[in-house]
Structure formats: C-alpha cells, structure tokens
Amino acid sequence: MKKINIAIVGLGTIGSYFYNFISKNKDAISKKTNVIPNIIYVCARNPKKKRLFKIPKKKWAKKYTDIVKDKNVDVVVELIGGSDGAAKDLVIKALLNKKHVVTANKALIAKHGDKLSKIAEEKKVNLEYEAAVCGGVPIIRSIKEGLIANKIQKVYGIFNGTSNYILSSMDQNKLQFKNVLIKAQRLGYAENNPESDLNGEDVASKVQILSSLSFNSFINKNIHIEGIKNIDMDDISNADKLGYKIKLLGFSELINNKIYQRVHPTLINKSSYIASINGVLNAVIVNGLPVGKSVIQGEGAGPSATTSALISDVSSILRGNIKYPFVISNKKRKKLHSGNISKLSFSAYVRLDVKDKHGVLSNITKTFSRFKVSIKRLIQNPAKSKKNSSIVIITHRALDLNLQKTLKILSKKNYMIKKPKLIRIENN
Ligand SMILES: NC(=O)c1ccc[n+]([C@@H]2O[C@H](COP(=O)([O-])OP(=O)(O)OC[C@H]3O[C@@H](n4cnc5c(N)ncnc54)[C@H](OP(=O)(O)O)[C@@H]3O)[C@@H](O)[C@H]2O)c1
C-alpha cells in the first residue's frame, strides 16, 4: 500500500493527541483511504520539554524550516497557533515547497486565508482547515461537499464552546461569570488567556471563514464584534423571566448581495433549537436553497473533537485529488461589499439601571420615541435600597442605528447609574 509522509509541527494539547491517535489508528485509516499515514517527523518549540509519551528520537526535527525543505515530507500539519509568527511562516514555506498543509488555526486562516489559498492553488497542493472552525463539527466539509448544490443565504450559530459553557452554567447553576470562568479554566475548556473566547474574536474568525466558503467570496474583514464580558446574572435571570436564553452567536448573511457579519450576545426563544445547545457544544445552522435549513452540532473544541476534524483533512489528502481551499478557484472568488449592522433591524432587550426618582420613566420613554424605537414590554425592578431601580425594556423591531442612538443619549443622563445595556433578539 502507498505511504504518505506526515510531519506534525506543534505538540501541545492538540498536536500530542493527534500524534497518538494517528500512531494507534494507522490501520483503520489505511483501510478507509487505501494509503498508509506515516508520521515521519514531529517538531515543537522546545524538543527537551518532558512529554507524556515517547517519540522515537529519529522522528524529531530540530526546526520546522528543515521539514519544509525535506523531499520526503508530503503533508505538514501545523498545530502551533497564532495568526502570524511561526505558524504563518511554516504554512507559507510548506505550500511554496509543494507540501499539502493541514491546520487547526482559525486565526491564521481568517487573517491570511486568501493569500495562503492562492499559493496552494498555484502550487497545486491542498490547504485543509476543518479543525479551525467548531472543532469536531464537520461544517467546512459539509459546505464544500455535502451542501455544494446550494446557494447559501445565511450561516449562524454557536461557534465557541468556552463562552457557551460560561453562559449555560450561569443560567443552569446560577453562578457568577467570574466563578464560572475559573471553573472552565480548571476543567480545561477555557485557555489560560481566554481573551479571544470572551471578547468574540474567536467567533469572528470562524464567521469570516464560513462567510467566505458560503458566499464564494474573499475573506471580508468587516465584522461587528461584541463578547460576553458584560453579561451578568441579572441579565440571565431577566431573560429567563421573559422566556429567553442568552447565547453568544455568530452570524453571516447575504442581503442584496452584501455580506453582513456580526458576533454578539443574543436573546433567543427558550423553545428554539439553538437554546438547547448547552455546555461546550457548538451548533451551526445553514440556510440554503434548495436544502432549506441544515443543522449540525457537536463538540466545538478539545483535543479529541479537534483530532476528529484533523483526521478528516488528512484522509481527504490521502484519498488524493487537489481541491480548492475555498471551494472554487481564487480566480472565481468574488470581492463582495459588506453591509453595516446599523442598517439591520432588531427587537432588543435594553437594561437601564437608574436612580429611582420622579420623571425618569417618562424621560426614558420619550427618548425611545424620539428615535422611533417603540416599546413592546417594560418591567421595572426596584433595587433593595429602593433608591435605584433596574428597568428592562423589550423593543419592537427597530433600525440598529436608532437603537444605538437611543442608548447613546440615555447613557449621558444623570439618572443613569450604569452604562445602558443592549442585547439583540433573534427570532429564529
Ligand atoms: N485547544 C483546542 O481545543 C483547539 C481546538 C481547535 C483548534 N485549536 C487550534 O489548534 C492549534 C494548536 O492549539 P493547542 O491548544 O494545541 O496549542 P498549544 O497547547 O499551545 O501547543 C502549541 C505547540 O506549538 C509548539 N510551538 C510553538 N512555537 C513553535 C515553533 N516556533 N516551532 C515549532 N513548534 C512550536 C509548542 O511547542 P512546545 O510544546 O515545545 O512549547 C507546542 O507544542 C491552534 O491553532 C488552536 O487555535 C485548538
């Protein structure tokens, strides 16, 4: 049976698991692909670091720059991470040297995917990145192959396991954000520096990649990003009383030939499918024609789920055929214009923590009507001190621009004791 030589660069959480999985499942993979996956080299930053498993000495490469020049290497698996630096340098050099590349690096693909796919196409090699979006959920291959017949109009969902774990634990276990984050880090869901999980950047990278695949366009950098750091237990419990759950969702839509990309905490109906996706699970929903609504869910992160996606990429290479990294040739991808969130309309949850004094409520309602935002429900929760109160408003659909203007004016009022909060509502 033919053998294909694989070099793994990066032996951290993912690389270690991936190395061991391939080593133990070589036969099963060869049965399915008719090719033997052979790990010829591994490489990490510090070869002297104590690893939890044995790797034969002869497999260790000192530097990745040696690997990319080695004629015996067919596939390079990049598991270093980061949008630039060593990861970018390795992938570019590997592609230029006609090596197929597999990567789990969403930051790299979202930032440099266009440039990298151009090199891959010119050099006639594969650039595969299933593991970069939603871990074990095979959404990339679904869009590229299973859903190839479709004109996709919208792709959205829960794309970050850490933030979903935090929001669902706050909801189910009534724990404060800070405490859940500590627990998530202890359990290994959140990284030591969970910044990009919490500020929405991680979801944004995935949305940009999915947009590009769905709409056959170049990666579009224009994206509205809000994370979950401002969500507190009061928001969770207000949402619950009103029949909603709060989720961090990513959206990409094609409206009048313009791409609208956004990431923000979202109120969704408790009875909706997406409200039932809890813990570290991810879910991706694709609206396309002729398929209609297609849903795929699963473990979004962690070494086992990510390895499942990496093996799918490796197997695709083992089976042969050169595929375009973004479904179609770079020569045919479009540069689509993007639209701004301010032009979209939403119902919204608005929370105003105010001094409880005469005239405040009428001033608030006047401000809403000044910007043509009509109020559907208004609930006033007096604080224990009775000097303050928290006003929760659910608006009818209004232009996002007008919602923003309303909040901007309200934030300057002297009766406001905290920055006003707005969470958009999705009616799907
Ligand atoms: N963790 C997840 O759940 C998850 C899920 C999906 C995708 N991903 C993606 O998978 C990738 C790897 O993530 P991870 O969690 O495994 O990261 P990690 O644990 O930090 O591992 C990074 C590895 O890269 C090595 N490395 C760093 N600089 C290097 C260099 N210049 N040359 C060679 N090796 C170098 C490190 O070497 P040392 O071991 O010597 O320090 C380490 O083995 C990232 O792109 C991440 O976004 C991760």
Image (tube, helix red, strand yellow):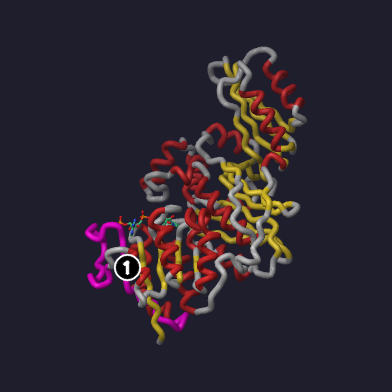
Ligand 1: give its quadrant: bottom left
Above or below, 407 relative to 270: above
Q: Which type of secondary structure does the marked residue at label 1 adopt?
A: helix
Q: Position of residue 275 (x, y in %)?
A: 60, 48
Closest to the observer: 401 or 415?
A: 401
Classify the position of the N terminus by image quarter: bottom left
Look at the image and tell me whether residue 162 can be seen. yes
Q: Residue at x 39, y 82 (%)?
A: 3
Closest to the observer: 73 or 313?
A: 73
Closest to the observer: 37 or 180?
A: 37
Rendering quarter of residue 55: bottom left
Q: Residue at x 37, y 74 (%)?
A: 73
Q: Tell whether position 78 is magenta.
A: no
Left or right for 409, reference 39:
right
Above or below, 17 relative to 264: below
Q: Position of residue 252 (x, y in %)?
A: 64, 52
Left or right for 186, reference 210:
left
Closest to the observer: 40 or 406?
A: 40
Magenta stretch, residue numbers:
31-60
Above or below, 175 relative to 251: above
Q: Is mark 1 within 8 Å of ligand 1?
A: no
Residue identifier under label 1: 66
Q: Residue at x 48, y 53 (%)?
A: 107
Q: Tell whether position 33 is magenta.
A: yes
Rendering quarter of residue 64: bottom left
Label 1: how many Cα within 10 Å (few below 14, some 14–19, many 20+): few
Left or right for 293, reference 264:
right
Look at the image and tell me whether residue 381 can be seen. no
What's under tag 1, amino acid-wise?
Answer: Asp
